[in-house]
Image (cartoon, rainbow, N blue to C red):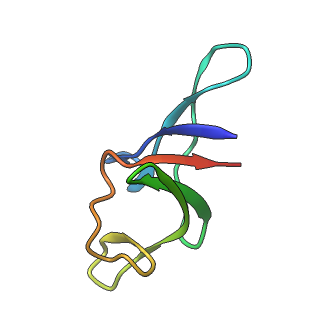
Amino acid sequence: MKQGTLFYDNESGRYNFFYTDGDGNRRDYGGIHCGEVFEFRLNEVWIPARVEMGDDRKWYLVGLPGLKLDGLEVKAE
């Protein structure tokens, strides 16, 4: 499981995070894509979610469109 903190990557135009692999090396997740399912942590609970891009070209979590993505702790396969 890869775990890290979301940030907006201006170069790719996607939200991304860094994680530490099994050897202790820092790795780039490579960006979260539309429709990709991952988990985010809210009030110490891990919640499954899907990220999409709206007509306004802004990223959001399906079902939680007002939640700020920057700084969310996430984990993905």
Task: Give the answer, above or below, for where 48 lies relative to 11.
Answer: below
Could you tell me how many numbered marks the image carries? 0
Say which of 9 and 6 sits in front.
6
Tell me where residue 2 sits by quadrant.
Answer: top right
Q: Residue at x 33, y 57 (%)?
A: 69
What is the residue that sits farthest to the top in this orientation?
24
Which x, y percent locates residue 63?
42, 81
Viewed as shown, does residue 71 lie left or right of 45? left
Please name the residue shown 72% across and 14% down the image: 23
Rendered position, 23 above or below 65: above
Lateral position of residue 64 relative to residue 25, left or right:
left
Of 69 and 52, which appears nearest the observer?
Answer: 69
User: Residue 21 placed where, x, y %?
Assistant: 68, 24
- Residue found at the very far front of the displayed protein: 44
Q: Image quadrant of residue 1?
A: top right
Q: Could you tell me residue 19's position as x and y percent?
A: 56, 30
Left or right placement of residue 44 versus residue 2 in this view: left
Q: Please give left or right for residue 52 compared with residue 48 in the image.
A: left
